Amino acid sequence: MLVPLIFEPYARDLAKRVAETKPQDVLETAAGTGVVTRALAALLEETRIVATDLNQPMLDHAKARHSDSKRIVWKQADALALPFNDQTFDAVVCQFGLMFFPDKVRGYSEAWRTLKPGGRFFFSVWDRISENEFADVVTQAVASLFSQDPPRFLARTPHGYCDTDRIREELNAAGFSGVSIDGVDARSKAPSPRDVAVAFCQGTPLRNEIESRGAAALEDATKQATRALAERFGSAAIDGHMRAIVVTAIR
């Protein structure tokens, strides 16, 4: 549910930015189930792509959708300790992964190390949660059920790394220059409010925070989020604004 809901528009945008630089060797970190990998492969027919993720089952799922591609190498790897030689890649790409890195500068430094001189690091993070309507409504709806201890995963982590001054400073600390930062708006569309509620409440780590609050909490939270989304956007197919921050930095 989450890929078409929030990830696909930004995957196409990021892949287009990478393709415009005509790289020969691309490294993707935090590749997940491969939405960016697929977009890159469609645009870069002669490029070698190395797709990595910390989670092997994610890579297995992604690889299953690219079983006929000889240009893509799938490898389990930690983005904070990449198993690649210095100056190997023309581009390093990461969509919506940096927010989860426990040490952002170290992650940037590893990208810098593995890039060739003049290579580019492309990545995206979510803007503040108030700029992402579905996530904001879900967070507020779930919080209303647990007023003493509201689950705040979405605001704290996916939408918690959006200070562009901090991003620029940490990239500079890792050695990058020529940092370009763009705000990119898009629309998030779903067949129903229930689909959005299930995606966020049951398909993200928000689920862990909800379930820790009781056996019935997950379904109660999903229903509450569904009601709040229907009140805001309607009970049929719904459409909400979302905004990401897309960064390009030069080694």
Image (tube, rainbow, N blue to C red):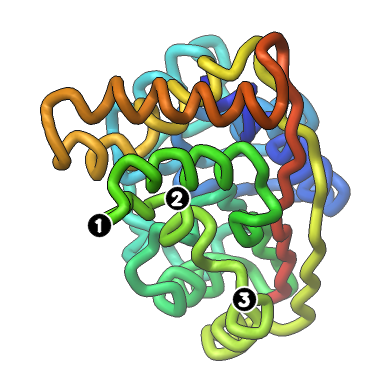
Q: Give how far apart the Cα atoms at labels 3 and 2 are.
A: 16 Å
In this picture, residue 60 sits left or right of residue 47? left
Name the N-terminal-most of marks 3 and 2. Answer: 2
Circles 1, 2 touching at the beta carbon (< 8 Å): no
**SS type, badge 3:** loop
Select label 3 or label 2 by which is in front: 2
Q: Which mark is residue 234?
A: none
Which quadrant holds the C terminus?
bottom right
Examine the rendering and report whether any part of residue 59 can be seen: no
- What residue does disc 3 label? 163
Q: Is residue 157 above or below residue 229?
A: below
Which one is earlier in the sequence, the residue at label 1 or at label 2?
1
Question: Which residue corresponds to the image point at 40% horizontal and 58% vertical from the top-left?
Answer: 100
Q: Is disc 2 surrounded by few (<14), some (14 to 19) or many (20+) residues within 10 Å?
A: many
Q: Mark 1: which amino acid?
A: Gln
Residue type at mark 3 is: Asp
Secondary structure of residue under mark 1: loop
**Viewed as shown, does residue 122 lie left or right of 34?**
right
Task: State the image coordinates of residue 144 (x, y, percent, origin top left).
Answer: 39, 44
186 is higher (above) or lower (below) than 106: above
- Tell me whether the residue at label 1 lies in contact with that at label 3, contact meaning CB atoms closer than 8 angstroms: no
The image quadrant that residue 124 belongs to is bottom right
Judge by depth and name the residue closer to the eye, 138 or 179.
138
As drawn, the label of residue 148 is 1
Identify residue for label 2: 154
- Badge 3 local density, few (<14 within 10 Å), some, or many (20+)? few
